[in-house]
Amino acid sequence: MAEHDAEGVKPTPAVAAAVVERGRVLMVRRRHPPHDDMLALPGGRIESGETLFEAAVRELNEETGLVAEAQRVVTAIDQLQYDNGGCLLSHFVIVVVACRRVSGNAVAGDDASEIHWLEAQHIREASDLCASARQVALELVEGGQRR
């Protein structure tokens, strides 16, 4: 069991934008930790005074250039990062928001180095896909919630 009294580490609220089109999920290759150089859903920290939906739409636009409409909360994920000695380094509470593209073509920007639209088979097999993003993406694609 992880130590809950990790000195100085507080949970940080964040969002991830889940965009599904034609059975494919939009992923970005992250430039920065956590999960740097891994594929993940676009997202980031929630800014003060910003709603979950506003943050998801903003982060999606910053990382991909897409203009979108936030539709619903899909799930929430605890993302805990530890050092080699087992000490807690960071704790993000990531709320995944389903978004529908309104306009734009996805291009890498801000914290993303690449854009990928992944089908279910690639989601299952990709070794460079963040585990939490894999789980959410498979639920969206295989759960019949295609947009």
Image (tube, grey):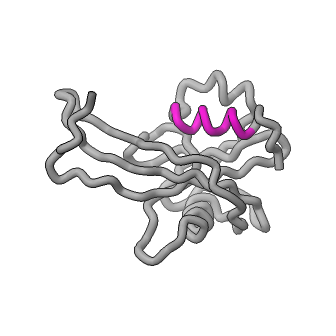
List the single residue furthest toward the left.
Answer: 7
Identify the residue shown where x is 60% and y is 33%.
134
The part of the chain drawn in magenta is 131-140
The quadrant in which residue 106 appears is: bottom right
Q: Nearer the viewer, residue 137 or 108?
A: 137
Q: Residue 118's image quarter?
A: top right
| Most frequent secondary structure within the magenta stretch | helix
Q: Position of residue 34 (x, y in %)?
A: 39, 44
Residue 52 left/right relative to 102: left
Q: Residue furthest top?
A: 125
Query: Along the horizontal axis of the image, is 9 left or right of 53?
Result: left
Above or below, 131 against 140 in this view is above
Query: For the N terminus, which image quadrant?
Result: top left
The percent position of residue 122, horizontal first and vertical second, equals 69, 28
Which residue is at 48% across, 51% downward? 94
**Place of residue 51 in the rendered image (x, y in percent of width and height, measured from the top left):** 53, 71
User: Depth check: 50 or 128 in front?
Assistant: 50
Q: Residue furthest bottom?
A: 49
Query: In the displayed structure, does residue 117 sit left or right of residue 111?
Result: right
